[in-house]
Amino acid sequence: MRCTYKFPSDDFYCWRYQVWYNSYDCAYRTKFQTSPGCRDCPQGDGNLKRHSVKLANVRWPGAGGPEISDDLEVETVADVLAAALK
Ligand code: SF4
């Protein structure tokens, strides 16, 4: 199913997840490999190049490393969707 909802900050369409998304967030995910589902993604590589200067000095804030569980990602997505539906 294709999601057509677009936040004002969404500036590209993610073909893998079929959602509008923010290219900086995508670049951040790609740089720190925050989601297993975003691995080996040419679109993510392109967004990382696009935001490479902005992300050059950004460090991963998590104490346990860049990987997060799928459960945490599902919770994050659920929070975003709940906020959007308010
Ligand atoms: S890395 Fe790929 S799959 Fe992940 S949000 Fe970016 S475009 Fe989508």
Image (cartoon, grey):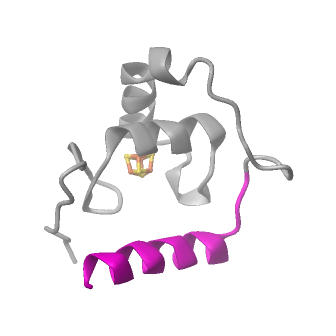
Height in image: 68 above or below 66? below
- Examine the residues drawn in magenta and state their main secondary structure: helix
Image location of residue 59, percent across then percent down: 69, 31
Looking at the image, residue 53 lies above or below residue 22: above
* Residue 1 shown in magenta: no
Q: Position of residue 67 (x, y in %)?
A: 73, 54
Please, which residue is most extreme toward the front here?
86
On the image, the x and y values in percent for residue 24 come to: 40, 37
Front residue (pair 62, 44): 62
Q: Is residue 69 left or right of residue 2?
A: right
**Number of callouts:** 0
Region rendered in magenta: 67-86
Q: Residue at x 21, y 59 (%)?
A: 7
Residue at (52%, 71%) from the top-left corner?
76
Q: Residue at x 59, y 34 (%)?
A: 31
**Residue toward you, 52 or 70:** 52
At horizontal 77% and vertical 49% (from top left) the residue drawn is: 62
In the rendered image, the vertical position of residue 47 relative to residue 54, given as above or below: below
